[in-house]
């Protein structure tokens, strides 16, 4: 038998440029595309709260901060939790009056080499509109043991999981841990080898300023999009990570001062957003944005404009009270 010459299969630049490919899609616009991603942070830092917030945004077609989510089914593998704890978390996050039927939660699964991929394919067959799968945490699904080296072990597992995102139009987000050792580059703090970072489409790293503090930085490095760095603050009342706007003072500060003629005003976020939008035709502030921006600027509004802000949840909804300091 004649020897078959080995060669490459190539495509020339003009042919490649003439091809039509579907544009990159996002589960969360700009910051979380479809593909395989890792979200890492130290233990008990609040990764699960952020993961659940991301899942809720996609399941309801809502927002994460100022970024809109693609509405779709969500599979959340909360492998370090139980249903009672998860129910309590959803209630704290004020989701009781929102349709959460597209968020599907499981507290157990098989491992990567023991049936997880088959479980996932069967779920996607039943729920073809799935746009996000969250695995909390990655270590809970790793069951194959080392093979030659840590790098090969990491790369093999990521390659297996990538098969899901190669076949389906969705995001697979793996919650993972960081090492205790400090590094100026947050991506170098991921537990495991460089095979993890090299095999995924992007990495999010959540780092607190201090262990007991409520402020953190989220660094995002994606293969196909720009990088991001967000300063966040944990809202203990609703157990959500809120985005701290880079601007020292937002327009809402002066808008509230102009609006509050009397000593006090109280109403719902919807009522306040309608009032502020009527005062300024150039704004389009949603009730969710009103609440977030007021919370982010409470100190400025109190110290510079002499207005106290309080938030209260009653039976018929959430209320905001604005009052002039005496």
Image: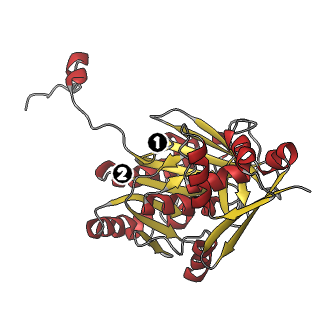
Determine whether 310 is above or below 152 in the image: below
Horizontal side of residue 276 vs 68, given as left or right:
right
Residue contact at pointers 2 and 1, CB within 8 angstroms: yes
Q: Quadrant of the C terminus?
A: bottom right
Q: With 220 as the anchor, is 207 left or right in this view? A: right
For the residue labelled by badge 2, is the local secondary structure a helix, a strand or a loop?
A: helix
The residue beneath circle 1 is 201
Sequence-first tag of 2 and 1: 2
- Label 1, residues with CA under 10 Å away: few <14, some 14-19, many ≥20: many
Between 186 and 273, the one lying in front of the other is 273
Gap between marks 2 and 1 measured at Cα: 10 Å
Asked whether the viewer can see residue 129, the reply is: yes
- Residue 270 horizontal/vertical position (percent): 57, 60
How far from the left and from the top, in percent, is residue 311? 72, 65
Looking at the image, the residue that sits furthest to the front is: 262
> Quarter of the image holding residue 323?
bottom right
Q: Residue at x 22, y 31 (%)?
A: 20
Question: How far across and down, in percent of the image, does residue 109 sit?
Answer: 45, 73
Instruction: Compare residues 256 and 14 and report the one nearer the observer.
Output: 256
Is residue 148 visible in the rendered image? The answer is no
Helix, strand or loop under label 1: loop
Residue at 72 percent across and 44 percent down: it is 258
The disc placed on residue 165 is 2
Name the residue: 54% across, 75% down. Answer: 96
Q: Quadrant of the N terminus?
A: top left
Which class describes the residues within 10 Å of circle 2: few (<14), some (14-19), or many (20+)?
some
Q: Nearer the viewer, residue 166 or 248?
A: 248
Q: Position of residue 288 (x, y in %)?
A: 58, 56
């Amino acid at each position: 038998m004649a020897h078959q010459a080995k060669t490459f299969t190539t495509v020339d630049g003009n042919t490649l440029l003439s091809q039509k490919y579907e544009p990159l899609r996002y589960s969360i616009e700009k910051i979380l595309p479809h593909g395989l991603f890792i979200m890492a942070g130290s233990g008990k830092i609040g990764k699960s709260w952020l993961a659940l917030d991301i899942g809720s945004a996609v399941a309801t077609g809502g927002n994460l901060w100022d970024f809109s989510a693609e509405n779709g089914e969500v599979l959340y593998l909360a492998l370090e939790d139980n249903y009672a704890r998860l129910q309590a978390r959803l209630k704290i996050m004020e989701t009781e009056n929102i349709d959460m039927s597209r968020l599907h939660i499981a507290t157990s699964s098989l491992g990567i080499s023991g049936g997880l991929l088959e479980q996932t394919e069967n779920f996607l067959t039943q729920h073809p509109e799935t746009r996000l799968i969250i695995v909390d945490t990655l270590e809970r699904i790793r069951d194959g043991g080392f093979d030659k080296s840590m790098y090969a072990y990491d790369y093999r597992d990521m390659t297996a999981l990538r098969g899901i995102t190669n076949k389906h139009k969705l995001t697979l987000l793996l919650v993972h841990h960081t090492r205790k050792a400090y590094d100026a580059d947050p991506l170098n703090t991921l537990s495991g080898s460089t095979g993890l970072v090299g095999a995924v489409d992007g990495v999010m790293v959540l780092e607190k300023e201090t262990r007991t503090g409520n402020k953190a930085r989220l660094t995002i490095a994606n293969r196909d999009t720009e990088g991001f760095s967000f300063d966040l603050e944990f809202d203990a009342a609703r157990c959500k990570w809120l985005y701290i706007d880079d601007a020292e003072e937002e327009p809402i500060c002066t808008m509230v001062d102009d609006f509050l003629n009397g000593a006090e005003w109280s109403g719902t976020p919807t009522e306040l957003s309608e009032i502020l939008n009527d005062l300024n035709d150039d704004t389009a502030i949603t009730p969710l944005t009103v609440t977030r921006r007021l919370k982010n600027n409470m100190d400025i509004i109190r110290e510079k404009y002499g207005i106290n802000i309080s938030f209260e949840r009653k039976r018929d909804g959430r209320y905001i009270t604005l009052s002039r300091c005496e």
